[in-house]
Amino acid sequence: MSFGRPVLHSDDAEADRLLIERVRRGETDAFGALVSRYIDRASAVAFRIVHHREDAEDLVQDSFLAALRHLDDFDASRPFWPWLSRIIVNRGLDLTASRQARLTENLDQEVLDSSADASADAERHDLREQFRRALEDLPPRRRLVIELFEVEGLGIAEIAAAIDAAPATVRWHLHAARRQLRAALERFHGDFR
Amino acid sequence: MKQIHGDVTPDRRMADAIRAATGARRSSQADLDALQGRIMTAATPYMDARLSMRPSWLDYAAAWSRTIVPVGLATAVVAASCLVWLTSSARRSTPSNVEHVAMLGAATNSVSSGDLIDLAVSDVEVPLSAPAARR
């Protein structure tokens, strides 16, 4: 899934500001509109962190509620999405650290599910497993950077805001992740197409 | 699809490989709607709390009272000062010694008309004993 609009415009920020003012006054409809605006992006980012749909949904719900609880601390003159994405990333990385065993179990099941078509054979499954292990060997933050950039189509600046790092740091993570995965990718080139 | 993000270009093969390895679960609109419903239900207590924190007219009155009471007190002090000033000013506006001497001199015909004119245009107060100096 790609968001298709990795850069937020000033209109978005202004619309966010108005919605946030209304939410602060206790208007439920405004909170609904805010959730509606970002639930798609939030779900995509959450899935890239926890790699499990139900966990991703829990993470999104938890993050929106955390944002609501701390909305008075938020500077409404700034765009809402970077703040929300930081909440999702921080909570998500904490969650994956505490649920590592469960995550691995579910990923195994997902890979089996996705390769359960008629053309799947043992060798292909093996190659995919090796790439997956190479991906899992990446540090969580680095893995998140490459997944958000390559799969979700987020820009460097947006990822930097989400993981609370400088754009140069994001580029460095991306470069390092690609270097680590490149060998596995070249070996199994064509098997994922 | 190639996109340019600053000086870094996404790698399509890498993206496909990651999708294949991790799954590319895209939530359907129905999934997102259901999730939004869950979020809104869970948010109800927080929104209710915000609503109850919303200021009523009593809060406005209480907030204004913190301004109005000092302003009222200050106004009372200023009004009292004005009254005191006006009273003393009225007292000062009673005939001065010069006028008193001139009127007394004129009434008793003890001051010449030239001296009366002098008294009328003079800023210098004349001692009360002046009318006694009969010419």
Image (cartoon, coloured by chain):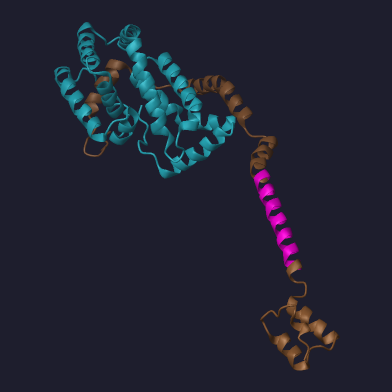
- Is B112 on the left or on the right of B56, as rendered? right
- Is A105 on the left or on the right of B39, as rendered? left
Between A109 and B97, the residue placed more toward the observer is: B97
Q: Which chain is cyan?
A: A
Residue A163's image quarter? top left
- In x, y percent, where is residue A161? 33, 32
Task: Residue B86: say if magenta.
Answer: yes
- The quadrant the C terminus of chain A occupies is top left
Residue A79's image quarter? top left
What residue sits 71% from the left and 59% below the top?
B82
- In x, y percent, where is residue A87? 40, 25
Q: Which chain is brown?
A: B
Which range of residues does the magenta coloring cover? Answer: B69-90
In the displayed structure, would residue A168 be above or below residue A48? below
- In x, y percent, where is residue B84? 72, 59
On the question of residue B2 being in view, the answer is: no
- The quadrant the N terminus of chain A occupies is top left
- In x, y percent, where is residue A25? 58, 34
On the question of residue A29 being in view, the answer is: yes
What residue sits 74% from the left and 93% below the top?
B114
Query: What is the total number of numbered labels drawn onto the structure image?
Result: 0
Instruction: Name the chief secondary structure element in magenta.
Output: helix
In the displayed structure, would residue A26 be above or below residue B89? above
